[in-house]
Amino acid sequence: MTDEQARAFLAEGTRTGKLATSRADGRPHVAPIWFVLDGEDLVFMTGANTVKGRTLRRDPRAALSVDLEQPPYAFVTVEGSVEISEDLEEMLPLSIAIARRYVGDAEAEAFGRRNAVAGELLVRLRPDRIIAVDDLMGD
């Protein structure tokens, strides 16, 4: 995939990302996330006291994998570092955008407002490396 194709793949539908981080003791942690693209960044939210939130504050390195789970199978993996914000004004429109993607227009505003609150983190994954493969079946 080209970079443009990889970004289109990441933005398509309601594909869930699988975020990988490293715990303080070195054990891996993988968690599903909802996300949107915002320019070059992948943006998601998490609670400050979750494993993701604590881990990313300690070590900003992360990887995110998104895949097509039916033929012809494909995936995009993004590696990079995150920037974290607790600014509720910055968080709200992105929280609504994430909600719009996954729960639809009718519930986006309420769902987004419910999540853009104190104790939540707005996380921007800034890509350093993108690995993208389409058509794993080789057709």
Image (cartoon, grey):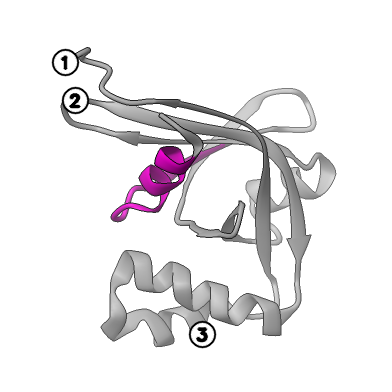
Label 2 near label 1: C-beta < 8 Å? yes
Q: Distance between the residues labelled 2 and 3?
A: 37 Å
Label 3 near label 2: C-beta < 8 Å? no
Disc 1 element: loop
Instruction: Quadrant for residue 13, please give it.
Output: bottom left
- As drawn, the residue found furthest toward the right would be 58
Q: Magenta residues, as a range?
A: 4-19
Q: How far apart are marks 3 and 1 (CA)?
A: 44 Å
**Percent x, y of residue 48:** 70, 61
Which residue does the numbered mark 1 point to in the structure image?
139
Circle nearer the N terminus (1, 2) = 2
Q: Observer-nearest residue: 26 or 90?
A: 90
Which residue does the numbered mark 2 point to in the structure image?
72
Residue type marked 3: Arg
Q: Residue at x 37, y 43 (%)?
A: 9
Disc 3 element: helix
Instruction: Quadrant for residue 74, please give it.
Output: top left
Q: Is residue 12 magenta?
A: yes
Circle nearer the N terminus (2, 3) = 2
Q: Is residue 111 above or below residue 49?
A: below
Q: Residues within 10 Å of mark 1 (few under 14, many from 20)?
A: few
Q: In this view, does 13 lie above or below 139?
A: below
Which residue does the numbered mark 3 point to in the structure image?
113
Q: Nearer the viewer, mark 2 or mark 3?
A: 2
Residue type marked 1: Asp
Image quarter hosting the N terminus: top left
Q: Which residue is drawn at 56% across and 80% down?
A: 93
Residue type marked 2: Pro
**Percent x, y of residue 138:** 22, 12
Q: In this view, does 19 lie to the left or right of 133?
A: right
Label 1 near label 3: C-beta < 8 Å? no
Q: Which mark is residue 33?
A: none
